[in-house]
Amino acid sequence: MRTDDEKQQLFKNVFESYSRLVYSVAFSYMKNRSDSNDVMQEVFLKYYKNMDKLSGYGHIKPWLITVTSNICKNTLRSSWFTRIVSEDDLDAVPYEEDFGEESDLFRSVMRLPEKERVPLHLFYYENFSTSEIARMLGVKESTVRVRMMRGREKLKKLYKEESV
């Protein structure tokens, strides 16, 4: 069992190491700063409550991403969220303020449907393998590859439209 000081230090280290990653994954789902921050706060609260159960520093990263993904999916499915947030609100998000990305490609990635956007984001922006993404999202590796292939096809069309 950890002392309170050890627990606080571990939490601080994990937060400093993974907060950008958790925010990035949340943003790829939520597509706005406020909801992404809310998700990030909920993820780290869950981590704090469960940190004694997690063994080893290597298991923390996939656990955080899986929890982030699940919280985002639950939030997006909630009746409150679907009534409050309109598509117009989501389209007005200044992505470059959050990620420093001003490229048309990044904007195109963020316009993809969630099922294609999230695996592509995790693969290209967070450098996870398809097998790691499959475990985190709770789907088969072949499903991840198919979603990425479809996402790339849609991305080509979106990028061409925006470049014209």
Image: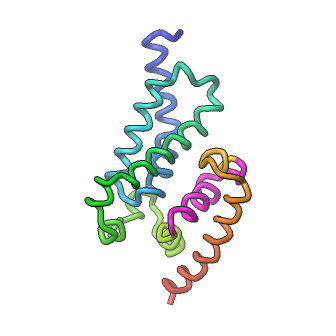
Q: Is residue 150 above or below residue 23?
A: below
Residue 138 in percent (x, y) is at: 62, 47
**Residue at 73% in and 58% down:** 142
Task: Tell whether 65 sits left or right of 149.
Answer: left
Q: Residue at position x 67%, y 50% from top?
A: 134
Residue 100 in the image, given as x and y percentages of width and height? 45, 61
101 and 59: which is toward the camera: 59
**Residue 119 appears left or right of 30:** right
Q: Is residue 82 above or below residue 106?
A: above
Question: Image quadrant of residue 143?
Answer: bottom right
* Residue 64 falls inside the magenta stretch: no
The one nearer the camera, 84 or 27, is 84
Q: Which residues are magenta?
A: 113-131
The structure residue drawn at horizontal position 26% and vertical position 59%, both measured from the top left corner, is: 84
Q: Residue furthest front?
A: 79
Figure disc tally: 0
Residue 122: say if magenta: yes
